[in-house]
Amino acid sequence: NGAAGHQMVFALKEPDGGQDAVFYSIGPTTATRNESSNVILEESFSKNTRPSGALVMSRSGDVMIMGGGKYTFHLVQQDIADSAESSPRWTNVSVSVDPTGPAVDLSSDGTIMIVGRGYHNGENGDKNSAGIIRLYKMTSNPPAWLLEETFYGTKNQDYLGLRALSLSGDGRTVAGGSPTVSSAEAGHASGKVSIWKERSPGQPWEKYTLRGTRVNENFGNEVSLSMNGNVLAVKSHSW
């Protein structure tokens, strides 16, 4: 959903092995529009650099990101005094960490982003596919993503940030699911969810862990946080 009651519609095309990303703006009272008059961004990607994974837009409607971390778009209002172009334009604000993962999420205002990479080998490089979630904050003039926090998986095959992750609307709570993790108490693939919460700016983030309770529960298959991060929904693959 975009700003001012507008909706954003995303479509992908693959001409000749490449890929086009096309974004449409649809008015709040209009059911259908001519596509050619409502394309606000069209971005082409080569076959080897096309994005994969999630697509997320801020509730303010001026920031959107595509999984892979290389493609984040920031809406910039064109200065009419300096240009005859009166419509807004989008700029690609890339994340410098490479490779990043397909799982991404944004705060409501689009100024905070998390990017997961499930095959990362942990904080010291000694945990096979422990996973990682990185938190970035957007600066302005010019727009840029700066790395602020890093959250690591702690066990082999935690796969933290592989797919299931969520950022609260205020950007102060992060949740990541590890649905294939086993435990001595609950058994094979019981799963777990790791949660980090910023209580006070500048202080270390507090960590919490929720665990599945039975064999093959895959607890943490999907996660979703509320606006203030005080409510968390967790999906299990089977029950």
Image (cartoon, rainbow, N blue to C red):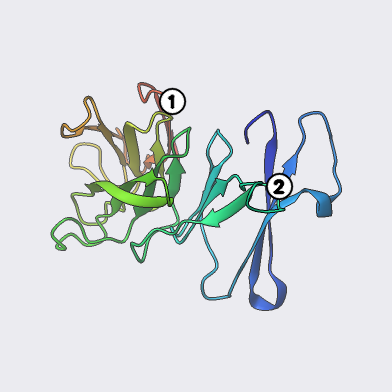
- Is 23 left, or right, of 36 in this rendering? left
Observer-nearest residue: 224 or 51? 51
Say which label, 2 or 1, has the lower sequence index: 2
Q: Secondary structure at mark 2?
A: loop
Where does the image place residue 175, in percent across and percent down from the top left? Answer: 34, 37
**Residue 1 visible to an observer of this rendering:** no
Observer-nearest residue: 180 or 35? 35
Report which residue position mark 1 lands on: 226
How far apart are labels 2 and 1 at the CA level?
A: 36 Å
The mark lying in front, picked from 2 and 1, is 2
Residue kind at label 1, given as amino acid type: Ser
Report which residue position mark 2 lands on: 86
Residue kind at label 2, given as amino acid type: Ser
Observer-nearest residue: 22 or 218? 22
**Residue 193 visible to an observer of this rendering:** yes
Residue at horizontal 44 percent and vertical 48 percent from the top: 104
- Residue 122: name its quadrant: bottom left
In which quadrant is the C terminus drawn? top left
Where does the image place residue 96, in percent across and percent down from the top left? Answer: 35, 62
Local crowd size for mark 2, using a 10 Å CA cut-off: few (<14), some (14–19), many (≥20): few
Q: What numbered label is drawn on residue 164?
A: none
Q: Is residue 101 above or below residue 202?
A: below
- Is 41 left, or right, of 123 in this rendering? right
Residue at horizontal 52 percent and vertical 76 percent from the top: 48
Residue at horizontal 43 percent and vertical 52 percent from the top: 142
Q: How many marks?
A: 2
* Residues at marks 2 and 1 touching, judged by CB atoms closer than 8 Å: no
Q: Secondary structure at mark 1?
A: loop
Local crowd size for mark 1, using a 10 Å CA cut-off: few (<14), some (14–19), many (≥20): some
Q: Is residue 98 above or below residue 234?
A: below
